[in-house]
Amino acid sequence: MNIALWLERIATTQGDRPALFRGAKQVADYAGFHRAATGLAGALRARGIRPGDRVAMFMKNCPEFLIALYGIWATGAAAVPINAKLHPKEAAFIIENAGAKLAVVTPALGLETASDVEVLHGEGFDAACVHDPVPVLSRGKDDLAWLFYTSGTTGQPKGVRITHGMLVTMSLGYLADVDEVHGEDAAFYMAPMSHGAGLYAPVHVLHGARHICPMSGGFDEVELLDAAEAQGPLSMFMAPTMVRRLTDVAKREGRRGEGIKTIVYGGGPMYLADIVEAVDWFGPRFVQIYGQGECPMAITALSREEVADRSHPNWQARLASVGRAQSVVELAIDGAKAPGDVGEIMARGLPVMPGYWRNLEATNATLVDGWLHTGDMGFLDADGYLTLRDRSKDVIISGGSNIYPREVEEALLTLEGVREVSVVGQPDAEWGEVVVAFVVGDALSDTDLDAHCLAHIARFKRPKAYIRVDSLPKNNYGKVLKTELRKLLEEES
């Protein structure tokens, strides 16, 4: 089925429910949301867009994003959302690779000078939304709905084919394993709607919840705290770095996050010390998920009860995990023979992609015998909790022993004064690789850092060098760019 039918149904039965907001101002109820989306679908069809065509979306977080997304789906085309923080030339690469016939663009993003496709924005977009509406076109579960481009931290991004069936499965999995959604709830969009935050829009449409785009268009801690108090209950997706920042600001201002219902965190490593501090301050508002574009938001989940639990004898190990397999997938560790064996994490099930866009080589390397090979290393304990180690390419092999950077990072982050840390391997003639830690925080001597590591991890795992930096390089999604850190080491050697 076409996932846009969920919008049609709620608009038909509860059209007067408030739907789209720009800050505190309501932009549309569900009837208006549906009318604009199907009007846009009519305009796209009049421009020659046909089922299966790709329409790019180079847009900031705004209510128009959701109108465009559902309009594209309604006409039977596939959306290609692009992070608005990318350079226009990067966006143009994605548009060309996807073979998009048209791009819906937030004004002033500069795409007009970087792409040859027709651009729809501003008054042209507004006019398209009042075109004669068309009914939602029927689509099958295997039809392309969302062409999701990976972050491209190790090369050009690849297009992940996300189907209507995958989106339906992921959304129902959210209700089963992540959180309940009610009509009085609101999805609050701070993280890029082109990625994880936007993927959670359909389940909130299904239940007629509100959709709020902050006036800033992005992540502002005070704006969030204010909005939660005035417009809650709010649910949102955050990268771990955002949780860290929110906790710091809330503690400084003495605010406990009233009106925040749920913060789903994922997309990168959440360090144990950070989530403990966040729960201690805000209470049981956090749910962890682990997923990839190739299995969007749907591999594992750690419930709010488990995140907040301090009574279980293994609570720290569980909190350091990413939870258990979601209801819609199977989970396995490649080559593992017993609980605790580390290997590559694999998943299979209905939310797993059918493959990459026009990239058979990458598809065959990633999908093997029905299993998605995630490229992440980890282990399952006897109770089925998955603990991540690192990306397989980030594992450090020193003197023949595997060292997982995250384990070293977790140890260093328990030292007061260390705010952020990232560990990488540096080539070494004697050992193959040695461990190097990039540290953000208060002035600490190498002796202090070394003594702390020796008190918490094996001697062979401790860093051979500590490099102080003001900040860690991150991509547009908050993930640390270890490739950039390795380049710094190369330049200094």
Image: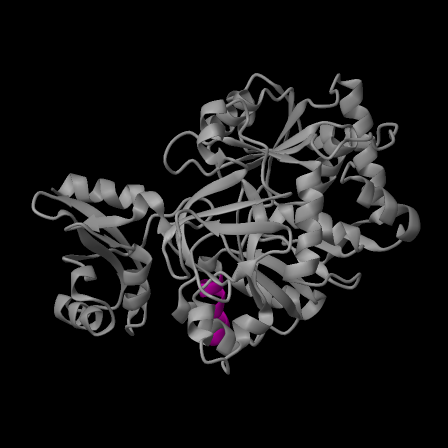
In magenta segment, residue 220: no
- Residue nearest the viewer, comparing 279 with 113: 279
Quadrant showing the C terminus = top left
Q: Which quadrant of the figure contains the N terminus?
A: top right
User: Which residue is at the far bottom?
Assistant: 311
- Majority secondary structure in the magenta region: helix
Residue 48: give x, y in percent of width and height.
75, 16
Give, as a single range, the part of the protein colored magenta.
243-252
- In-image side of 448 versus 17 (left or right): left
The spot of residue 349 in percent (x, y) is 61, 44
Q: Quadrant of residue 244?
A: bottom left
The residue under the point 53% across, 46% down is: 347
328 in relation to 131, above or below: below
Q: Residue 355, position in %: x, y? A: 55, 31
Furthest-left residue in view? 430
Q: Is residue 65 visible?
A: no
Left or right: 458 in relation to 372: left
Quarter assignment of residue 111: top right
Relative depth, front residue between 195 and 288:
288
Identify the residue at horizontal 77%, vertical 31% (top origin). Answer: 139
Colouring scheme, one of rainbow, by chain, secondary structure, one colour: one colour
Query: Looking at this rendering, what residue extends furthest in the front direction?
Result: 337
**x and y percentages locating residue 425 in the rendered image:** 22, 48
Q: Residue at x 14, y 51 (%)?
A: 399
Depth order, front residue of 354/474: 354
Relative height, residue 178 to residue 282 (above, below):
above
**Can residue 378 be seen by looking at this rendering?**
yes
